[in-house]
Amino acid sequence: MRDRLQALNGPQTLGNGRAFWISFAVVLAGALIYPAWADPYDVGNSAYFLIWIFMALGLSLMWGYTGILSFGQTAFFGIAGYGYGVIAINIGASGGLTFVALLCAVSLAAVSAAVLGYFMIYGRVGGVFFGIVTFATTLALAAFLHQTAGPEWAIGKARLNGFNGMGGMSPLELPWFGGPIYLEDTALYYFVLLLLLAVYLGLRLLVNGRFGNVLVAIREDPLRAELLGYDVRKFQLAAFVIGSALAGLSGVLYTAWGQFITPASMGLPAAAMPIIWVAFSGRSDLTATLVGTFTLLLAFQTITIYSQQYALILMGAVLLATVLFMPTGLMVEIGRLIRRLHARATAGPAP
Amino acid sequence: MTAILEARGLHKRFGGLAAVADVDLAIEDGEIHCLIGPNGAGKSTLFKLLLGTYDPSAGRVMFQGVDVTRQKPFERVLHGMSIKMQVPSVFRDLPVSQNLVIALQRRLPRTGIEAEMRRLLALLELEEQAGKPAGELSHGQQQWLEIGMALALQPRLLLLDEPTAGMSTDETFRTGELIQRLNASGMTILVVEHDMAFIRQIAQRVTVLHLGRVFAQDSIDRIIADPRVAEIYLGKTDVD
């Protein structure tokens, strides 16, 4: 057991010590009791923030850890979101079937990423071109769905509805004794929170293990990694598929949350958002990405209440400032600062 | 003795230029073999053909009796080759210790990695730098770390491309000693080099490359005594 827990810590995460895990427990406890005193509307809103973090964590894994920048994670968000809608509407999903729809939709995103990623990675599309191809993919998907307004654009019973987006799919329903629990507001919040906890811890295990060692080796020097006997492209593809499946998970949760998805979720402003969150937070650390993304989403929504244009301009400014002044990301810098201060405090005076 | 690595009729053309032309080369099991030649002789191209980052225009590469011509570098590594590149290539942002762990983890179970890493750190005289990012090491230390990573794979054949580039005389000499120690423990080693003093220190057999072709192949003593080699190689470059 102790060994298992120890595997969560390692060189690929900033927070490893006792102090980190105590803060982690405090924050988690706070998040767990938060619905007890908060307004259900706010709780639902917080669930909405958490929903996006899966996509950010996935991007951190592929960009920050493996060194492959995808500018089109929203493509997989959209594929899974629309996938969930199409499946849920067609099978008239309710109860446990909504989870079957969720799994199928996330798998659809993963398979799409595997196909696209295979041709890119094995076709030696690298560096900035990887970003361009993924970006073009998400824009092409958005443009395609945009013109599906007519009644001829339907998959089974599900109308795609073009610009206006697809609606009417059921929310997630957890089968329970005495009737299903509809995952909305507080119930959805708890579901997403626990899912996020599982994904976060799972990713920590992954990056601090052998697999993660190879990922960061590829980020640092792909040829050296290959000369140590690692099939670099296989690892890159694996990271891309995992990251994209997480983007897909965000897409399904988003669609189930609002019972709605539009092509705009794959358009240009949407595609830029994950990059901004992850760059601002610090792509090379999962915890930094998690905390930073949540902070930015909260700030973005607070400003959007007054003006969406201003919010977008502010996000652009945040990205510029990060790239110019703090390329490693704000949260990672804060994390490193805390670690230095902590090291100094525990080192104490020389004997 | 049998050949562990063999090149048969290797050609590599870049447009109209034949960088490597009709090269036959046999590295015998257990020897230290040096590949020398003036700048532009095709040494680096031949090296890349042997490790698989270049595909040959014609010819074959045999490793331990298996045709590996179409194999990717990582597949050749899995069969027992290990490579140190000319420019030090280490994982610069990662600590020295993690560099070695990444090299060791494919071969060893989790419990065995730590001890082997300590042994390598001692061998490389990098114990005190274990926690430092590899990019902060001196140039010579980075070269040693990369040699250490290549050794971590416990290869049958070690390929070294100018392992002493940028090293001080003292570091160069100690690198030579390390190579001889490794060879004494049974490792076959191919070294591409410029530095004649270093070649004299370590070489058993030497292949001289000139204009992409094998110009001479013999024991180190006879190569040094060969006036034709002196003319094309030693006469044109500075020898320290």
Image: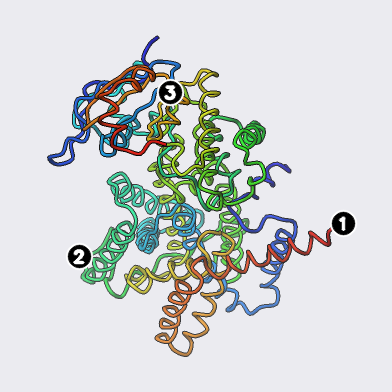
Q: How far apart are marks 1 and 2 (CA)?
A: 80 Å
The amino acid marked with disc number 2 is Glu
What residue would you read off at disc 3? Answer: B203
Direction right: furthest residue = A351
> x and y percent of residue B78 in the render?
43, 28
> x and y percent of residue A319 in the render?
44, 74
Chain letter of disc 1?
A
Quarter assignment of residue A101: bottom left
Asked if residue A278 can be seen in this view, the reply is yes
Query: Mark 1: few, some, or many residues within 10 Å (few <14, many ≥20)?
Result: few
Chain letter of disc 3?
B
Q: Nearer the viewer, residue B136 or B111?
A: B136
What residue would you read off at disc 2? Answer: A152
Query: For the C terminus of chain A, which image quadrant?
Result: bottom right
Q: Are marks 2 and 3 on the same chain?
A: no
> x and y percent of residue A235 in the render?
43, 43
**Residue B118, above or below A56:** above
Q: Mark 1 or mark 2, which has the lower sequence index? A: 2
Asked if residue B64 can be seen in this view, the reply is no
The amino acid marked with disc number 1 is Pro
Horizontally, is A202 left or right of B88 in the view? Answer: right
Q: How far apart are marks 2 and 3 (CA)?
A: 77 Å
Of badges 1 and 2, the one in the foreground is 1
Q: Which residue is drawn at 36% across and 15% down?
A: B3
What residue would you read off at disc 1? Answer: A351
**Residue A256, above or below B84:** below
The amino acid marked with disc number 3 is Ala
Q: How far apart are marks 3 and 1 (CA)?
A: 52 Å
SS for callout 2? loop
